Amino acid sequence: MPLVPTITVVDDCLLVGEAATLQAQLEQAGVACSSVERGAEVVQALRTNRSAIVILGESTCEPGLLARLRSGFPDRTLLAWQVSRSTARAADLLEAGLVDVLDPSMGERELVARVRNAAERRAPREPQAVELGQLAVDAPHGVALWAGVGLGLTGRERELLQVLAQAAPATVRREDLYRSVWGYAMVRGDRTVDVNVKRLRAKLAAVTDEVAVVTEPGVGYRLELREADVAVTPL
Amino acid sequence: MRLTLVPQTKEFYGLFAEAGDNALEAARLVEQRFREHPDTEIRQEQVKELEHEGDRLTAEIFRLLNTRYVTPFDREDIYGLAGAVDTVVDQIEAASELLDLYRIEVPMEQSLAQCGVLVEATSALAHALSGLRGFRGIDVHLAQIKRCEDEGDRIVRDAIAALFEDEDASPRAIIRWKDIFEALEQAIDACDTAAHVLGNVVVKNT
């Protein structure tokens, strides 16, 4: 499901009124918003909320949560909302990886402009269909072909192949494969990725020896093409 | 019901040996089912058949108990031992059923380790039950079952801890796997319970 240009306002601040004011300003400017009250709820909310932009109340911007948001939802743009302007704190937040820091000293036009700029700068990270030599994969549309012939993959196998093809020739960690395809953190001992890769390998081997999934022990997998000068081409 | 005065103790020993072998077969079947899942040809119905066989053997032991005046050891111990061995197979079948009930995609490594320990424990139990006549050579098998129970405890603690290491793990996966880990652990513990009963029998009769 593609991300939508709505904005989630997350405010753990006691001054709830200010967050509501920001939300009303943005909605008045034509930007759709939703909200959660506490930082502890944002990870769960983002699993179903497709907002492209997340504005975090300053007090929710603790390193653990920021790390989880960046690793779990790399396709979202994170901004911060300060209750009162502090250049030192703003610098900390920007250095922590937030795209912008907003505060009430900004007029309505500036606030909306900054948020719109952040939305426009955001590069969508939806899975992109990919062509790799004679391999063509477009998992959301059920496509996985070798030389124009269907590979007979299941949905999971297609998604795995797409992630590997997009990253090729780099190795993708098991944990990242699991997160990308199954949407959650991988539990230690879970063999789901390994078993699905094994099946994928068998189906690829049944049609060609020119592409293979290679294991990097202790790390993950990578897709290797045994042709020269192949380019990864988005479809 | 007419009671027989002539001792027919070998029937009891034969039935206990069969019950032990049945428990081992159930453990091996479930271990293979976990290892090969979801590409296994072993169906839950096959495991259920072994559970029914366990019930049949237990019922036969109870029937003998009610029709024999002389028993090879205390009636209450025969009753307790038969029930304990039956519980082993029941627990094995219950754990195996969860693979289908929870629509498990791929069994976790820790569950395969548990299944391995379960096979070892039931193997030791089967050997102990086969040696019931004469009460000799049983202690070594009971010690093995105890080691398996300790190993099972270690695996299940680590397995459950792994489920909670990352807050972003799937809640459904946590629910499913906590249940399965605990079900397999109960099957291993059931072997230890049977071993305790057997141990008491040995102490009383030697």
Image (cartoon, helix red, strand yellow):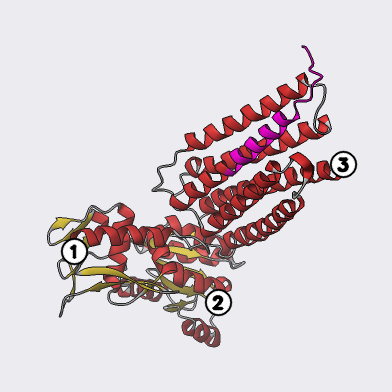
Dot in front, 3 or 2: 3
Which residue is depicted at the point 48% across and 37% down?
B44
Q: Quadrant of the N terminus of chain B?
A: top right
Q: Quadrant of the C terminus of chain B?
A: top right
Characterize the magenta stretch by its predominant secondary structure: helix
Which residue is depicted at the point 33% across and 55% down?
A156
Secondary structure of the residue carrying tag 2 is helix
State how far apart marks 3 and 2 are (Cα).
64 Å
Q: Label 2, on which residue?
A: A63
Crowd around label 1: few <14 · some 14–19 · many ≥20 (10 Å):
few
Which numbered circle lies on residue B204?
3
The chain to which mark 2 is attached is A
State how far apart marks 3 and 1 are (Cα).
69 Å
Horizontally, residue A190 falls left or right of residue B4, namely left
**Percent position (x, y) of residue A234?**
19, 69
State how far apart marks 2 and 1 are (Cα).
46 Å
Please say whether residue B151 is one of the residues in the magenta stretch: no
Q: Nearer the viewer, residue B173 or A134?
A: A134
Q: Label 1, on which residue?
A: A208
Residue extending furthest toward the top:
B1
Dot in front, 2 or 1: 1
**Percent position (x, y) of residue A138?**
23, 60
Dot in front, 3 or 1: 3
Horizontally, residue A73 falls left or right of residue B67, namely left
Question: Hey, what amino acid is under mark 3?
Answer: Lys
Marks 2 and 1 close (CB-CB < 8 Å): no
Residue A126 visible in the snapshot: no
The chain to which mark 3 is attached is B
